[in-house]
Amino acid sequence: MNIILLGPPGAGKGTQSSLLVQHHGMRQLSTGDMLRAAVAAQTPIGVKAKAIMDAGQLVSDEIVSALIDAELAAMEPTTGAIFDGYPRTAAQADALDAILARHGRQLDMVIELAVDEDELVRRITGRFSCANCGEGYHDTSKQPAVAETCDRCGAHEFKRRPDDNEGTVRKRMQIYREETAPILPGYEQRGIVNRLDGMAPIEQVTAAIEALLATA
Protein backbone atom coordinates (compact mmCIF):
# COMPACT_ATOMS: atom_id res chain seq x y z
CA MET A 1 0.00 0.00 0.00
CA ASN A 2 0.96 3.62 -0.52
CA ILE A 3 -0.18 5.89 2.28
CA ILE A 4 0.05 9.60 3.06
CA LEU A 5 0.17 10.56 6.74
CA LEU A 6 -0.98 14.15 7.17
CA GLY A 7 -1.03 16.38 10.24
CA PRO A 8 0.84 19.36 11.67
CA PRO A 9 4.22 18.94 13.39
CA GLY A 10 3.73 17.16 16.70
CA ALA A 11 0.65 15.22 15.59
CA GLY A 12 2.53 11.93 15.77
CA LYS A 13 3.20 11.20 12.10
CA GLY A 14 6.79 10.13 12.71
CA THR A 15 5.82 7.79 15.54
CA GLN A 16 3.07 6.09 13.56
CA SER A 17 5.26 5.83 10.46
CA SER A 18 7.94 4.05 12.49
CA LEU A 19 5.38 1.56 13.80
CA LEU A 20 4.10 0.86 10.28
CA VAL A 21 7.67 0.18 9.20
CA GLN A 22 8.15 -2.24 12.11
CA HIS A 23 4.85 -4.07 11.72
CA HIS A 24 4.42 -4.16 7.94
CA GLY A 25 7.87 -3.73 6.43
CA MET A 26 6.81 -0.52 4.73
CA ARG A 27 9.24 2.26 3.80
CA GLN A 28 8.92 5.67 5.43
CA LEU A 29 9.65 8.43 2.96
CA SER A 30 10.32 11.54 5.04
CA THR A 31 11.41 14.38 2.79
CA GLY A 32 13.28 16.08 5.62
CA ASP A 33 15.35 12.96 6.33
CA MET A 34 15.94 12.31 2.63
CA LEU A 35 17.04 15.89 2.03
CA ARG A 36 19.54 15.77 4.89
CA ALA A 37 20.87 12.43 3.65
CA ALA A 38 21.25 13.72 0.09
CA VAL A 39 23.14 16.80 1.29
CA ALA A 40 25.41 14.69 3.51
CA ALA A 41 26.11 12.23 0.67
CA GLN A 42 26.69 15.10 -1.78
CA THR A 43 24.46 13.55 -4.41
CA PRO A 44 23.63 15.75 -7.42
CA ILE A 45 20.26 16.60 -5.86
CA GLY A 46 21.91 17.15 -2.47
CA VAL A 47 24.52 19.53 -3.88
CA LYS A 48 21.83 21.54 -5.63
CA ALA A 49 19.65 21.62 -2.51
CA LYS A 50 22.56 22.68 -0.29
CA ALA A 51 23.35 25.63 -2.52
CA ILE A 52 19.72 26.76 -2.33
CA MET A 53 19.57 26.38 1.46
CA ASP A 54 22.93 28.11 1.94
CA ALA A 55 21.47 31.05 0.03
CA GLY A 56 18.64 31.19 2.56
CA GLN A 57 16.00 30.02 0.11
CA LEU A 58 13.41 27.26 0.29
CA VAL A 59 14.05 24.03 -1.60
CA SER A 60 11.73 23.87 -4.59
CA ASP A 61 8.89 21.43 -5.16
CA GLU A 62 10.88 20.11 -8.12
CA ILE A 63 13.82 19.05 -5.93
CA VAL A 64 11.65 17.52 -3.21
CA SER A 65 9.66 15.57 -5.80
CA ALA A 66 12.89 14.38 -7.42
CA LEU A 67 13.95 12.92 -4.07
CA ILE A 68 10.67 11.02 -3.80
CA ASP A 69 11.01 9.82 -7.40
CA ALA A 70 14.54 8.51 -6.77
CA GLU A 71 13.56 6.70 -3.58
CA LEU A 72 10.62 4.94 -5.24
CA ALA A 73 12.83 3.92 -8.15
CA ALA A 74 15.20 2.22 -5.71
CA MET A 75 12.45 0.37 -3.82
CA GLU A 76 11.07 -3.08 -4.53
CA PRO A 77 7.67 -2.76 -6.24
CA THR A 78 6.03 -4.83 -3.50
CA THR A 79 7.26 -2.60 -0.66
CA GLY A 80 4.63 -0.17 0.60
CA ALA A 81 5.43 3.51 1.00
CA ILE A 82 4.49 5.93 3.76
CA PHE A 83 4.73 9.57 2.73
CA ASP A 84 5.55 11.63 5.82
CA GLY A 85 5.79 15.39 5.29
CA TYR A 86 4.96 15.12 1.59
CA PRO A 87 2.95 16.33 -0.19
CA ARG A 88 2.71 19.71 1.56
CA THR A 89 1.18 21.70 -1.28
CA ALA A 90 -1.26 21.21 -4.17
CA ALA A 91 1.64 21.24 -6.62
CA GLN A 92 3.38 18.46 -4.71
CA ALA A 93 0.13 16.46 -4.58
CA ASP A 94 -0.12 16.64 -8.37
CA ALA A 95 3.54 15.68 -8.70
CA LEU A 96 3.06 12.68 -6.40
CA ASP A 97 0.25 11.31 -8.57
CA ALA A 98 2.52 11.51 -11.61
CA ILE A 99 5.47 9.94 -9.78
CA LEU A 100 3.38 7.04 -8.48
CA ALA A 101 1.95 6.37 -11.93
CA ARG A 102 5.46 6.36 -13.39
CA HIS A 103 6.41 3.59 -10.98
CA GLY A 104 3.22 1.58 -11.47
CA ARG A 105 1.81 2.57 -8.09
CA GLN A 106 -1.30 4.33 -6.86
CA LEU A 107 -2.22 6.20 -3.70
CA ASP A 108 -4.36 3.92 -1.54
CA MET A 109 -5.08 5.97 1.55
CA VAL A 110 -4.66 9.39 3.18
CA ILE A 111 -4.69 9.43 6.98
CA GLU A 112 -4.99 12.81 8.69
CA LEU A 113 -4.05 12.95 12.35
CA ALA A 114 -6.31 15.73 13.59
CA VAL A 115 -5.18 17.77 16.59
CA ASP A 116 -6.44 20.35 19.05
CA GLU A 117 -4.13 23.35 18.69
CA ASP A 118 -4.06 24.35 22.37
CA GLU A 119 -3.39 20.76 23.44
CA LEU A 120 -0.70 20.44 20.79
CA VAL A 121 1.00 23.55 22.17
CA ARG A 122 0.97 21.98 25.64
CA ARG A 123 2.31 18.69 24.27
CA ILE A 124 5.21 20.23 22.38
CA THR A 125 6.25 23.04 24.73
CA GLY A 126 6.46 20.57 27.61
CA ARG A 127 8.97 18.28 25.88
CA PHE A 128 12.53 17.91 27.10
CA SER A 129 15.18 15.21 26.85
CA CYS A 130 18.30 13.87 28.52
CA ALA A 131 21.32 15.73 27.19
CA ASN A 132 23.38 12.55 27.41
CA CYS A 133 21.28 9.70 25.97
CA GLY A 134 18.32 11.51 24.42
CA GLU A 135 15.59 9.85 26.51
CA GLY A 136 12.41 11.92 26.14
CA TYR A 137 10.37 13.45 28.95
CA HIS A 138 7.49 15.87 29.44
CA ASP A 139 6.66 18.48 32.06
CA THR A 140 3.28 16.96 32.88
CA SER A 141 3.01 13.50 31.36
CA LYS A 142 6.45 11.96 31.83
CA GLN A 143 8.76 13.30 34.49
CA PRO A 144 11.90 11.34 35.51
CA ALA A 145 11.19 8.88 38.34
CA VAL A 146 13.88 10.63 40.38
CA ALA A 147 13.92 14.41 40.06
CA GLU A 148 16.60 15.76 37.72
CA THR A 149 17.94 12.24 37.02
CA CYS A 150 17.52 10.41 33.72
CA ASP A 151 15.71 7.10 34.09
CA ARG A 152 17.81 5.48 31.39
CA CYS A 153 21.38 6.62 32.02
CA GLY A 154 21.37 8.48 35.34
CA ALA A 155 22.63 11.76 33.88
CA HIS A 156 21.51 15.04 35.42
CA GLU A 157 21.50 17.40 32.46
CA PHE A 158 18.45 17.94 30.28
CA LYS A 159 17.72 20.05 27.23
CA ARG A 160 14.82 21.46 25.23
CA ARG A 161 14.66 22.11 21.50
CA PRO A 162 14.79 25.85 20.87
CA ASP A 163 11.84 25.66 18.47
CA ASP A 164 9.61 23.90 21.02
CA ASN A 165 7.91 27.15 21.97
CA GLU A 166 4.35 28.39 21.63
CA GLY A 167 5.04 30.95 18.93
CA THR A 168 6.75 28.42 16.68
CA VAL A 169 4.07 25.77 17.22
CA ARG A 170 1.23 28.15 16.36
CA LYS A 171 3.11 29.35 13.29
CA ARG A 172 3.48 25.74 12.12
CA MET A 173 -0.24 25.19 12.64
CA GLN A 174 -0.99 28.31 10.57
CA ILE A 175 1.26 27.09 7.74
CA TYR A 176 -0.40 23.65 7.85
CA ARG A 177 -3.87 25.20 7.62
CA GLU A 178 -2.88 27.53 4.78
CA GLU A 179 -0.69 25.25 2.65
CA THR A 180 -1.33 21.57 3.42
CA ALA A 181 -4.93 21.27 4.58
CA PRO A 182 -6.23 22.59 1.21
CA ILE A 183 -4.97 19.46 -0.56
CA LEU A 184 -7.44 17.32 1.40
CA PRO A 185 -10.62 18.11 -0.59
CA GLY A 186 -9.07 16.61 -3.73
CA TYR A 187 -8.32 13.39 -1.90
CA GLU A 188 -11.77 13.42 -0.28
CA GLN A 189 -13.34 13.45 -3.74
CA ARG A 190 -11.46 10.22 -4.40
CA GLY A 191 -12.84 8.71 -1.18
CA ILE A 192 -9.46 7.88 0.34
CA VAL A 193 -9.29 10.27 3.33
CA ASN A 194 -9.57 8.97 6.88
CA ARG A 195 -9.37 11.30 9.89
CA LEU A 196 -8.14 10.03 13.25
CA ASP A 197 -7.73 11.71 16.62
CA GLY A 198 -4.03 12.55 16.75
CA MET A 199 -4.36 13.58 20.40
CA ALA A 200 -5.37 10.06 21.49
CA PRO A 201 -2.78 7.81 23.16
CA ILE A 202 -0.25 6.37 20.72
CA GLU A 203 -1.61 2.83 21.15
CA GLN A 204 -5.14 3.92 20.24
CA VAL A 205 -3.98 5.75 17.13
CA THR A 206 -1.96 2.71 16.09
CA ALA A 207 -4.95 0.41 16.58
CA ALA A 208 -7.15 2.73 14.51
CA ILE A 209 -4.61 2.75 11.66
CA GLU A 210 -4.33 -1.04 11.78
CA ALA A 211 -8.12 -1.30 11.54
CA LEU A 212 -8.07 0.91 8.44
CA LEU A 213 -5.38 -1.18 6.80
CA ALA A 214 -7.28 -4.38 7.55
CA THR A 215 -10.31 -3.17 5.64
CA ALA A 216 -8.47 -1.56 2.73
Image (cartoon, grey):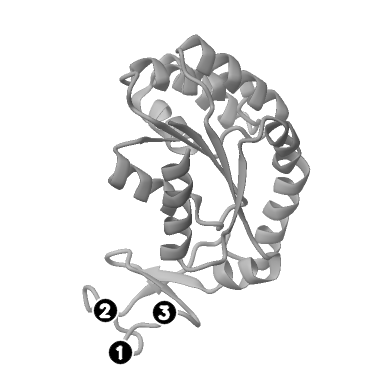
| Residue at 66% in and 21% down | 94
Of the two numbered discs 3 and 2 in the rendering, the one whose residue sits closer to the viewer: 3
Where is residue 69 shown, x and y percent of the image? 47, 17
Q: Quick check: 5 left or right of 178?
A: left
Q: Residues within 10 Å of mark 2 (few under 14, many from 20)?
A: some
Residue at image point 64% right, 25% down: 92
- The numbered mark at residue 6 is none
- The residue wearing badge 2 is 151
Answer left or right for 206 relative to 181.
left
What amino acid type is highlighted by mark number 3? Lys
Of residues 71 and 39, the one nearer the viewer is 71
Residue hosting label 3: 142
Q: Nearer the viewer, residue 204 or 143?
A: 204
Residue contact between numbered discs 2 and 1, judged by CB atoms under 8 Å: yes
In the picture as drawn, the residue positioned furthest to the left comes out as 153
Mark 3, residues whose alpha carbon is within 10 Å: few (<14), some, or many (≥20)?
A: few
Q: Residue at x 76, y 38 (%)?
A: 182
Q: Secondary structure at mark 1?
A: loop
**Dot 1: few (<14), some (14–19), or many (≥20) neighbours within 10 Å?**
few
Q: Amino acid at mark 1?
A: Val
Q: Which residue is mark 1?
A: 146
Of pointers 2 and 1, the one earlier in the residue sequence: 1
Q: Position of residue 4 (x, y in %)?
A: 54, 37
Q: Secondary structure at mark 3?
A: loop
Q: CA distance from mark 2 to mark 1?
A: 7 Å
User: Is 103 located above or below residue 38 in the figure?
Assistant: above
Disc 1 versus disc 3: nearer the observer = 3
Instruction: Looking at the image, tell me whether mark 3 or mark 2 is earlier in sequence order.
Output: 3
